[in-house]
Amino acid sequence: METVIDVKGLCKTYIIKKNSNNVLRNIDFTLKEGEFVTIMGPSGSGKSTMLYTVSGMDRATAGDISFLGKSYADMNDREMAKIRLVSMGFIFQQMYMMRKLCILDNILLPGFHAGLAERKKVREEAEMLMRRLGIMEIADNEINEVSGGQLQRACLCRALINHPKVLFADEPTGALNSKAAGEVVNELVKVNRDGTAIMMVTHSARVAAASDKVIYLIDGHIVGSMELGKLKDEADLSGRERQINKWLMEQGW
């Protein structure tokens, strides 16, 4: 499998009032094509910082990160922004969308901005994604007129509009009820089966059970990992969840 992201010796330090806060320490990490990896750990362990730095939203203090063989250190901010727009997708716990745009227009925006296809083709792609995720009926709604689950699925459509190589998800179910969370997880599994690599941060063992591999982070260090393999079907989730919970307890969760 092709290596999508390769991380070597990643360190991230913030200077706050002249004091150094070493959030990430010597992280080595590889994300391969079609892989679904979850990052877990207690609050403050550096999970979100790792996701933001690996995705290039934040710059590393030390170490090297490369995307499809090209080092972030060799890219300026404009080049990094282009890669995030065209080759990466993002969904977050907070569902950031433009309030003055309807749901469909929010999904179209990164597709139009990337300019990879004619606007008609981008619109057809957006509508196809919305039908696939079962939200076509809310296309013309404003973002405050839909449920949290519908809005997060719309965010997933937006993240996929440019056919990214990798999807970054930071607590994508954190603001959802269990039913909506399950629906979003099911869609993530489908996206991954279609070949998109996923790096996800979550506190939920149930959500993590959908991934191929779980990495455990404490105080900015990777202290363990658990290989799960591909999810067979939804019925397999409960057993995998129990496996993860047992393993997390062994890690000191």
Image: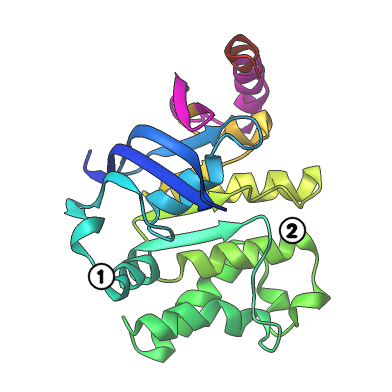
Q: Identify which residue, 227 or 7, lies in the foreground.
A: 7
Is 223 left or right of 87, judged from the image as shown? Answer: right
Is 98 left or right of 3, judged from the image as shown? Answer: right
The C terminus - image quarter: top right
Q: Is residue 91 above or below residue 182?
A: below
CA gap, disc 2 and disc 1: 36 Å
* Crowd tier of the residue under label 1, counting other residues whose Cα lies within 10 Å: few below 14, some 14–19, many 20 or above: few
> Was residue 231 drawn as part of the magenta stretch in this picture?
yes
State the SS at label 1. loop
Q: Identify which residue, 68 or 44, lies in the foreground.
A: 44
What x and y, as percent, mark residue 133? Answer: 61, 61
State the residue position of label 2: 149
What x and y, as percent, mark residue 175? Answer: 76, 52
Q: Identify which residue, 235 or 28, lies in the foreground.
A: 28
State the residue position of label 1: 76
Q: Amino acid at mark 2?
A: Gly
What x and y, as percent, mark residue 208? Answer: 59, 33
| Residue at left offset 38%, top offset 49% | 54
Q: Residue furthest toward the top? A: 250
Q: In this picture, which residue range is highlighted in magenta?
A: 216-245
What x and y, as percent, mark residue 213? Answer: 46, 28
